[in-house]
Image: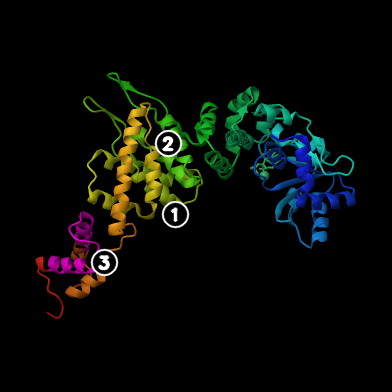
Amino acid sequence: MITESLYHQVIADTPALKVVAAVAQQMETPTYVVGGFVRDLILGRKLKDIDIVCVGSGIQLAKTIGESIGAKPVVHKNFGTAALKIEGEEVEFVGARKESYRSNSRKPIVEDGNLADDQNRRDFTINALAISLNKDDFGQLLDPFGGMQSLEDKLIQTPLAPDETFSDDPLRIMRAIRFASQLSFDIEADTFNAIKEMKGRLEIVSQERITDELNKIILSPKPSYGFKLLFHSGVLAHVFPEMVKLQGVKVIDGKAHKDNFYHTLQVLDNVSEVTNDLWLRWAAILHDIAKPATQRFHKKAGWTFHGHEDLGARWVPRIFKQLKLPLNDKMKYVQKLVRLHLRPIALVSEKVTESAVRRLLFEAGDDIEDLMKLCKADITSKDHNRVRRYLSNFKKVEEKMIEVEEKDHLRNFKLPVTGELIMETFEIKPSRVVGDIKNEIKEAILEGTIENDYDQAFQLMLDLGQKRGLSRSGN
Ligand code: ATP
Ligand code: MG
């Protein structure tokens, strides 16, 4: 956290705010910086877009500032807001307002109000802080709800009664957990209880907005924390019930399996230490999603989850659709990582053969590094020695992989002979035999019987054709 004199100075030195303050003072419109910018400024976090609230018309203020800098604001008349780029910063303007809610909608009834009314309508005390840009009290912090104290205590709490706050706009339930996870804050007890009580109200919120918040939780520094809050509040059961099914341990004949929920969270945290990529993090969340459905107990072998990687991969499109995540190549990428997530570790326990490495490189293609990150993150155990042993064997697999890739270039493998060439050479029409020959050539390369090389592949093609009684054209 930074001191008062320091943030006073940052406000005075931020070029965009200088412009806003100058015009607002000329217009004699009381104007304040508010919300996330003030919170992040005081916390010393990286600053993003700036929110400005004025007592009067936010649109008019934006237009007048626009005239002074030769730019036009983007106006959203329905919301009474306007956005303008000033000195390279995105600045959003709104007139101070009072909001009241009806029970069946997130859309409030809006009236003009003063600064206090506007601070009242904000979701959390840490988001209700404002700093004046006015002449007589420039740089003064206006903190009617003890937002500063909440920042010091690292607490998420609502300015007004929490159940009302969440009932009015249930998206705030997701936002509370999202801010807690992003900032590593606790959620104040009454606020958390209200989340538990009001979680059913999330049904009036669109899936897109819920998923936006979920993605922000996933992208926070230690996402397991956000997921534990989602789980313990019962929110997870509403927004992503499939994940809740991972939780729990069954014991038969004294044999227990891992709790797959906490294991998944550990893998998610592990992977988050080495990547900020949302989709690799999603792959971690989904890698064991089909374990509950494939779980069996065998008298000798104990618990098994055969085929959970394939079934899980098959579930990915349905889960993406439910969560309104994009159904594009990102989904395919997640699917692929889920499907292949056991493959590198399987190489650890076997003697690492070149052909197994070749096959994996061929299937993973450019996603091999990400797959290795996921697989490494998946090595979790309470037994530290065991983890260490696994990781050191895993290193051998990685080394072997680099060696094979340098030699064979299989990552973007294209068969050196094509179906067309096979058809031309033997003067045959498209048929099953073309596919068979192609497949045998591919297998030979992956097995290492021939190299990934045109001449060798061509020769093998001739041999395979001859074996099938085909003769080369012109012969
Ligand atoms: P970030 O931009 O990092 O997500 P932020 O706090 O700026 O965080 P925004 O969604 O940009 O969040 O909203 C800006 C401000 O508007 C918030 O700080 C808060 O004061 C207010 N706000 C946003 N959404 C809500 C809401 N659903 N209910 C009440 N106030 C809200
Ligand atoms: Mg913001």
Q: How many marks?
A: 3
Horizontal side of 312 relative to 99 (left or right) equals: left
442 is within the stretch colored magenta: yes
In the picture of the structure, the residue carrying the numbered disc 2 is 267
Q: Are marks 3 and 2 in contact (CB under 8 Å)?
A: no
Q: Position of residue 188 (x, y in %)?
A: 64, 25
Q: Are marks 2 and 1 in contact (CB under 8 Å)?
A: no
At 48% across and 39% down in the image, what residue appears?
A: 273
The answer to whether 130 is drawn above or below residue 448 in the figure is above
The stretch in magenta equals 438-465
- SS state under label 3: loop
Nearer mark to the viewer, of 2 and 1: 2
The answer to whether 420 is drawn above or below residue 6 in the figure is below
Horizontal side of 138 relative to 78 (left or right) equals: right
Q: Position of residue 336 (x, y in %)?
A: 37, 49
In the picture of the structure, the residue carrying the numbered disc 1 is 329
**Front residue of 466 and 343:** 343
Nearer mark to the viewer, of 3 and 1: 3
Q: Earlier in the sequence, mark 3 or mark 2?
A: 2
User: Residue at the bottom extreme?
Assistant: 474
In the picture of the structure, the residue carrying the numbered disc 3 is 416
